[in-house]
Image (tube, grey):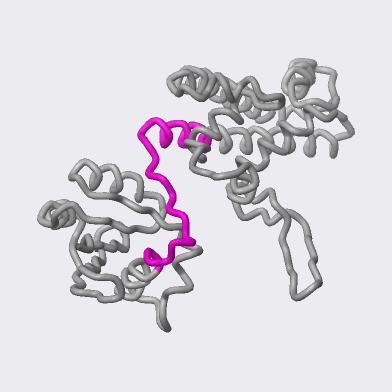
Amino acid sequence: MERTTVAIDLAKTVFQVAVSHRPGKTTETRRVRRRQLPVLMAQYPCSVVVMEACGSSSFWGRKFQSMGHEVRLLPPSQVKPYVRRNKTDSADAKALLEAHRNEAIRPVPVKSIGQQTLAALHRFRAGWMAERTARINGLRGVLRELGVVIPVGAPRVVPAVMVLVEDAESEVPDGLRHTLWEVCREIRDLERRIKEVERQLEALGKQFPAHARLRTIPGVGLLTATALLAFVGDARRFTTGRHLASYLGLTPNEHSSGLTRHLGGISKRGDRYLRMLLVHGARSVLF
């Protein structure tokens, strides 16, 4: 007997639900509000719940798993070809049902609370790092216009600027000293936040059994190890290392036909942040 398949097009407040009791046939469709969705799903027997892997999919996935349902999250890029003609919520839900029938589409695992916590910490750290870099570049640019060159290296910027601000005989205009001092204080505050996040990553990473093993790989440190745990999870879901590399966008693009095979640059289809960490780790080992 075929299990009931429930496809849900996730949204903020109104969700589109499509139900199929046998492959290729949509039995019913309905729109429900956020508070009604758990009540509706509790009425179905143990079913297969199909959703796109998006921002809130892991939250709903864990909730539906606790109800006894089997949850399958499909990559949005591989569901899109199944949307016929105009894009609507109903068409998106039906496309999920059709994409689910394709065994070549590999589902994305539901992330745990721990994984999502690690991912959130990485996002905040990356944002603060970008903000710190912008502030440092701003200081360098302003002082260069005044004929003052700051030594190379981010850790040297704030001490050098503070010396210039405190030196009454420096070339820094008096009307700019207070603002430069505020920017230096902002940079130091960002560095404090970054270090605190790294301490949290260290503590949370130890809760994952694979963390210690990942740290033994040359070029893999705290950031890369915890990012792999957050964004990839259990690497054993990939049958080969090449499948993992393809998931990360590290395999070459291919445009082949007949006896002609052409390989281009890496596809860059995976997570950009994680790929950047892996490339930097490889460079640290090679050079």
Most foreground residue, 194 or 148:
194
> Relative to 105, is 143 on the left or the right?
right
Most foreground residue, 115 or 121:
115
219 relative to 159, above or below: below
- In percent of width and height, residue 207 lies at 43, 20
84 relative to 106, above or below: below
> Relative to 26, is 149 on the left or the right?
right
Say whether residue 218 is magenta: no
- In percent of width and height, residue 33 lies at 19, 60
Q: In the picture, which quadrant includes the C terminus?
A: top right
109 relative to 83, above or below: above
137 relative to 23, above or below: above
The residue located at (53%, 44%) in the rendering is: 238
The single residue placed furthest to the bottom in the displayed view is 85
Q: Which residues are magenta?
A: 99-124
The residue located at (71%, 24%) in the rendering is: 218
Say whether residue 123 is magenta: yes
Q: In the picture, which quadrant includes the N terminus?
A: bottom left
Most foreground residue, 256 or 49:
256
Residue 222: name its quadrant: top right
The single residue placed furthest to the front in the displayed view is 1
- In percent of width and height, residue 122 lies at 53, 34
> Relative to 5, is 85 on the left or the right?
right
- In percent of width and height, residue 32 lies at 18, 63
The residue located at (53%, 29%) in the rendering is: 226
